[in-house]
Image (cartoon, rainbow, N blue to C red):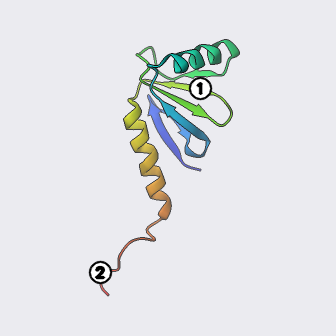
Amino acid sequence: MKFINVGFGNLVAVDRVVALATPDSAPIKRLIQDSKDDGRAIDVTCGRRTRSVIITDSEHVILSAIQTETIANRLEDSDAGEDDGEDEVDEDA
């Protein structure tokens, strides 16, 4: 199981991430408020401004102070690491 850092030493399982969004739009703000009301919100901002929202397959909403693009790059890097070097070219050949 692979994990990504979502800020301040907090990790999220890559396989559980369904969506990644910015907190600016009204529907995402409603989603955040609803998840707080239901107890499904996980705030890992450590008091800083929320810059990204991670939605998991268990319908938990994770609020992070890390930029959405940064988390997206970390997710892509974790996907690229799954190949385990299968695409490496043998330079001796």
Q: Position of residue 29 (x, y in %)?
A: 53, 16
In this rendered view, identify the residue nearer to me: 8 or 19.
Answer: 19
Q: Position of residue 34 (x, y in %)?
A: 64, 15
Q: How many marks?
A: 2
CA neighbours of label 1 inside 10 A, class few (<14), some (14 to 19), many (20+): many
Task: Say which amino acid is labelled 2.
Answer: Glu
At horizontal 66% and vertical 12% (from top left) the residue drawn is 37
Q: Name the outermost residue toward the front.
A: 26
Q: Which residue is mark 2?
A: 91
Give residue 61's mark: 1
In this rendered view, identify the residue nearer to me: 27 or 6.
Answer: 27
Can you say whether 74 is above or below 68 in the image?
A: below
Q: Are marks 2 and 1 in contact (CB under 8 Å)?
A: no
CA neighbours of label 2 inside 10 A, class few (<14), some (14 to 19), many (20+): few
At horizontal 61% and vertical 41% (from top left) the residue drawn is 16
Instruction: Specify whether 7 is left or right of 38.
Output: left
Q: Which element carries disc 2, helix, strand or loop?
A: loop
Q: Position of residue 54 (x, y in %)?
A: 53, 31
Instruction: Specify whether 21 is left or right of 55.
Output: left
At horizontal 48% and vertical 53% (from top left) the residue drawn is 79
Q: Quadrant of the C terminus?
A: bottom left
At horizontal 46% and vertical 18% (from top left) the residue drawn is 46
Task: Say which amino acid is labelled 1.
Answer: Val
Looking at the rendered image, the disc whose residue lies closer to the viewer, 2 or 1, is 1
